[in-house]
Every structure is written in C-alpha cells, then in structure tokens.
Image (cartoon, grey):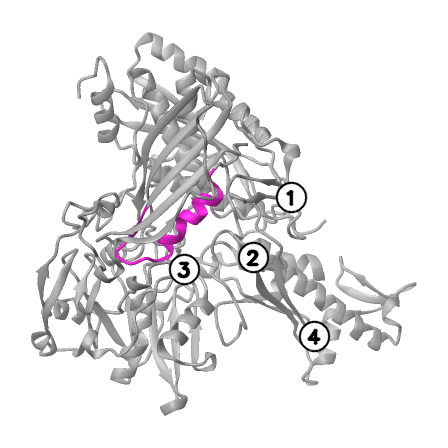
Amino acid sequence: MSILGNSVVRREDPALLRGEGTFIDGMEIEGALHATFVRSTIAHARISSIEVRQALELDGVVDVVTAADIDLPDLSPESPIMNAAMGRPLLARDTVRFVGEPVAVVLTEERYHGPDAAELVIVDYEPLAPVVDPLSALAADAPLLFPAAGSNVGMEIDARSMQADFSGCDVVVRKRIRNQRVAPAPIEPRVAAAWWEGEGEQSRLVLYLACQGVHPIQAKLMEVYGLPADRVRVVCPDVGGSFGAKAGTYPEWVLLGALSRRVGRPVRWTETRTENLTAMGHGRGQVQDITIGGTRDGRVTAYRLEVVQDAGAYPAIGALLPWMTRSMVTGVYDIPNAEFSARSVVTNTTPVVAYRGAGRPEAAAAIERAMDLFATEIGMDPAEVRRRNFIPADAFPYTNAAGTTYDCGAYEKALDLALEAAGYEELRAEQERRRQAGDTRALGIGLATYVEITAFGGGGEFGSCELRPDGSVLVKTGSNPYGQGHHTVWSQLVSARLGIPMEKIEVVHGDTDLIPSSSITGGSRSVQLAGTAVWDAAGRLVDLARQRAADHLEAAIEDIVFDQSLGRFYVAGTPAVDVTWAELGAAADGTGNPLVGLANFSAPGATFPFGAHVAVVEVDTETGSVELSRLIAVDDAGTILNPLLAEGQVHGGLAQGAAQALLEEVRYDADGNPLTSNFADYGVISACELPMFERIPMETPTPVNPLGAKGIGESGTIGATPAVQNAVIDAVAHLGVDHIDPPLTPERVWRALQARSTDPPSP
C-alpha cells in the first residue's frame, strides 16, 4: 500500500518540541548590534525635526539613524496598477502616515539598551488631519495622504465588464456590511538579521529572516540595493507562523542591510508584540455593499457587490485583494447576472496585507450573508435557497460571471453531508420550541457553502531529488514552509515514488544559495505546485537511475524493471540479480556526476476547493453572550496526501474563522490611535471558546495536476466566519435583528437587540 493517503506524523515536530529548531532570534551572530525602531506616535503629521543627541550619549548606543542618513529608494507599490505616487520610504522622511511607522532606528550593543535610547529620540511633529475610516477617505474634502496622487484611491476596479440587471426581480435586498480589519498575530513576530560578506565592490549582502519565500525578497533587495543575484543571499530557516503577513517586503527588513554596511557589523531585529500588532500588516478591512435579487420561489437572478478596501497608509498586497474577491464573487452559485466594483483607499492606519484566504473569505462572507438575507426576505429556509442556486455537479468546468473557471465541484453533496451530520431538521425543531417558549437561551444555526481559489493563476515551482552515495535522497524545494508540514509530505511523495524509507529522505528549503528559484508560499499552492514538482523530480530520478542500472547490469534500458515497492532495479525475467539505490549512489560517488532529478512544474490553471460548514450557537438574549457549541465542516480539497496534516490545517482555519466572527477586530479611535496594541486588548481565540470540531471527509480530485490535489490551508477560515456569523444572527432573527457586523461580541449583539427588538430584554 502506498504511503500516500496515510496519516504520517509530522517529521518536523520532534526538533521543535525539543527546542532544536533554528529560529533567527535564537541564533548566535557574533558582533551583532540590536536595532530598535523609533515609531510614530501620531497617525498623520509632518516631521519638523528629529533630535538624536541625547540618545547617542546613552551607554550602549552605537548609532541613531534617520531617513537623512539612508540613501536608498522608496519601496514602490506592490503592483504597477496601483498609484505610483504612493511609494513607501524605508524611514519616514517628511511625513508620517500611521501610528507605528518607523521614523528612526537605534543601534545598540545589547537589546535592552534599545527601548531606553529610543525614548530619548525627540521627534517634533506638525499634526495633519487624519483619515481613519475608508469611506471617509473617499469624501471630496478628505485629507490626502499623498497630495501628489490627487486622491486617496490607490487602485480601482470598475464595473464596466460586469453589469447586473435587477429589473426582472420579484425581490431585491440591499445591505452594507463590514469585513473588519484583523491582526494575523503569528506566534513568532517579524525577525531578521543582516550582514555583509567580503570586502569592497564584491561584498555580498546576507539576510536571514522569517518569511514566506526567499527569492521574492532577494529580488526586492536586488532592486533597492542595485545588486546582482550572486551578491544577495536570503535565508529563511524555521518560521513561527505567518498566515500571509510575512509574504510581502517590509521596510524594516530591507533597511537592515544599509544599517549593517553603515556600522560595519551585523545588525539584528526582533519586534515586540506591540510592534507586531501595530506595525506588521493587518488583514481583511473591506466595506461591502451587497444587492441581491431574485424570484419568490428562491432563485437568485442578480447580484452586485461593491467594495471599498482599506489599504492602510501605503498600498501593499492588501490593496490588490479586491481582485481575488472579484474572482470568487458569486461563490458556489449559478448567478450569471452579477456585478463587481471596488476601490482600494489609503487611510492613516497600518497597511493591509494578505491574511489567511486573502480576498476569498471576503467574497464568501458577502455572498453567504446575501443568501441568508434573501432567504429571510422570501421566507424560505436558507439551506433550500442554497440548493436551488448551486452550480450543478455536471456543469464543470464552470465559468462564473467574473470569468473564473472552476475545475470541479459537488456543492449540494457537501451541504447534504454537513446538514446530515448536524442533524439539521432536529436543530430547527429545537430552535422553534425555544422560540415558542420564550427561552432567553436562543439557538442559532448558521450555514456557509463556499468555493475558493488556490494556486491563483497557476504558475510553477521548483523541485529536485539527488541520490546520495549512501542511497539516501536530498530533496530541494522552492516552497517555504511555516508550519504546514511540507517536509513530511514531500518525504511521503518521494518515498512513494522511489521506494525509499522516509527516514532516508532529507528536505531543504529557504536558501537562495541552495535553491535556484522559488515563489511565495501562499494561496494554498504548495502541494499542487511544489508537491507536484517534487513528485516529477522523483520520477525523473527513476528514469536516470534506470539508465545507470542498465549500465551496471549490462542490459538494454528498455529491459530494466523498477520494483517500486522494494526500491530496486533488475533485468526483466531475472529478478534475482538486481541493483539497489544505495549501490547506484555508491557507484556515482567520486565521479562528480550524481544522479539528480530536476523539475519545474507549471500548472495550467488554479484549483477550486469547496465545502459546507454548519455552526450552532446559543445566544443569551439578556446579555448578548454567544457560545459556539458546534462547528461541522465538510472541506473538499481534492486528493488528500496526509489526512492528519490536512485535519490540522482545517482545525487551525476553523479556529481563525470563528475568531473573526466572534472576537477579533483591530480598532482605532477617530485620531488614528490604535486601541488594540497588545493581547490584553486584542482578543485571540483559545480552546476555551471553541467546541470540538466535527469534520466530514470528502474528496473530489482535480484534473489540473497529476496528484489530483487542491489547497487546504485556507478552507476552514473561509467557511467558518460566515457560518458562525449567520448562526448568531439566526439566533436573534425572531427578535427583529437582520444583521450584525463582526465581531459578534456580547456588547455588539446586545446593542443590536436593543436597537431592533420590539420588546427588548433588560441588560
């Protein structure tokens, strides 16, 4: 039986559990100075002056650096479709645009010297009017963050290519909803260290950092520093989580090389948790206007989604996310009459980046709320409305109104599995019983059926398999793991194809000196691209080994049989005489010609995982308190190579999706001051707030890659948020509440009850 499809325990964990992982903050770097950033304490202001004299006089301070000391270009916006006038300086030069923006950096001998010295850097600000709310940024009289840009719009998607007609609808429902800003909050914050190797014109910049892909960072450093690839090395060892926020390029990372060159010593930086919550990129942040229309028998015939995306102070990846939202605008539903438009605006807040799902959860949240609102308006069960609008299973490949072609799906089957596991009819009966009895412990049932896109745009990835003299195999991969378990799954793939035990397979990643190319690990692309590349590389190694075995056995290559189960080669008809991987590896030792299978797999397109979630909540209508009692999930990601790892990915996604629905929100006051700058103010979910998840397996292999695999890293997040939100609203719908924006905290639920109830309960 193949090792693929088995729940193999993660190979990565023993070293991590023993404290033997290689994390940058724990690395010994001889002579390294510590960087501490002086950050803006005001959201929008001109910098009148920066006084560093007192800081320089403090013991342990080696240097204090401002923008005037750095001769490097600004970071350009992430895409050429963004407003080019909205570039970001590595240190604020004339204007600060959000609380937490780096203004200066202090270099000290010891880390503990840094905060005291930073306090002594005196920055004189001339306050400017801030714009905090993204809708306010569009006003004609709104303060401009970049006067040269002419407006606060960094990127726009007009609706000319997608127009919806509501003229024939029996029912039209409109609602403005918010997909709130959240903080990725990985267990390891941003961390990096930089130094220069060699002397003079041939010196090489080395940057160690925790990121999602080394070659994109290398490319940015080459651009900023004007260096060729062989003079920039980027290394990413173990990473303590990311969720998308470490995918882009941060000015703090880029600046370390210039600081190191200035002082002639390595420079390292690890941010604090407050820095992480206020200065690392945030996620989500969309204001959505939905319009949905259709017939009273439950058929949706028109849908419009208008988005205002909060990009934060500088357009980063987050400003592009509406394109992802657009691609999945109609979800799992057959709605050819659809419309989408979006504007990404800059505000005096932390820049928005990719966060688990990156634009697809926003699309799912909008269409799933819209379906529930439509169902309520026509008086039909929300499960039945969904059934009447699903894309049928025989319609694939299916192209939606945005031009996105889905590979395969079975949406009604997924919903039926989830409803059956939940005991849906019994739950509805219990809900009605409680309502009739006037029970203050209201029961809510929320549904979400979703489809998402993984490996967006297709693309490719590198993989190689090298046979070593002892018969072991060195696997090189372009994928950059940060908790997913890539080393385990890649070892499974190679073991299955070569017949070599997993313990004889080593996987390396994340070093531009060792790996010739890589992309960002994100968008749930790894198994279907990098995994397939490794699979192909292993197959190419078999082909090379068959030729070497033919020479060894003095036979024609077409007569060589590879016994995959035992990892040996023999001549057809004479299996007693064979050659093993170890013998082939030893024969190549010393020749300088090892057997190496190389592959660069390119997928013809994306894949589209899908699923259905059912959330069950109890809401205390007197206090607004919410208890998530059940979460049932069907998540179909095609062929599952390791069920244990897939389950771990889904569990984490469900937790984060539920957290966004119930707890998490980055908040600012009217002046742009962050109100959620530590874990006392920003609510990260724990096991105490979560039920035992109920997962129902389902696999619909994709034809897009030979493994039949789709991505699963973000699925749980995408389905859980609207399911939990719909459940809470469903619990109090009989009291006159038709919508509550997340997070559905007790206060927010209670206030909604007070505002809409005809007979509101006492607080």
Label 3 sits on what residue type?
A: Ala
User: Residues in magenta?
Assistant: 309-329
Asked if the magenta segment contains residue 180, the reply would be no
Q: Residues within 10 Å of mark 2 (few under 14, many from 20)?
A: many
Give neighbour class at mark 4: few <14, some 14-19, many 20+ (Cα, 10 Å).
Answer: many
Q: CA distance from mark 1 to mark 4?
A: 32 Å
- Determine which residue is flagged by label 4: 595
Q: Which mark is residue 488?
A: 2
Query: Label 4 vs label 2: CA separation?
Result: 23 Å
Sequence-first tag of 3 and 2 = 3
- In primary-sequence order, the first of circles 1 and 4 is 4
Q: Which element carries disc 2, helix, strand or loop?
A: helix
- The answer to the question of whether label 1 and label 4 lie on touching residues, with beta carbons closer than 8 A, is no
Amino acid bearing label 4: Leu
* Kind of residue indicated by mark 2: Thr
User: Mark 1 belongs to which amino acid?
Assistant: Pro
* Up/down of 291 relative to 362, above or below: above
Disc 1 target residue: 701
Who is closer to the viewer here, 398 or 493?
A: 398
Q: CA distance from mark 1 to mark 3?
A: 28 Å
Q: CA distance from mark 1 to mark 2?
A: 21 Å
Q: Which residue is mark 3?
A: 247
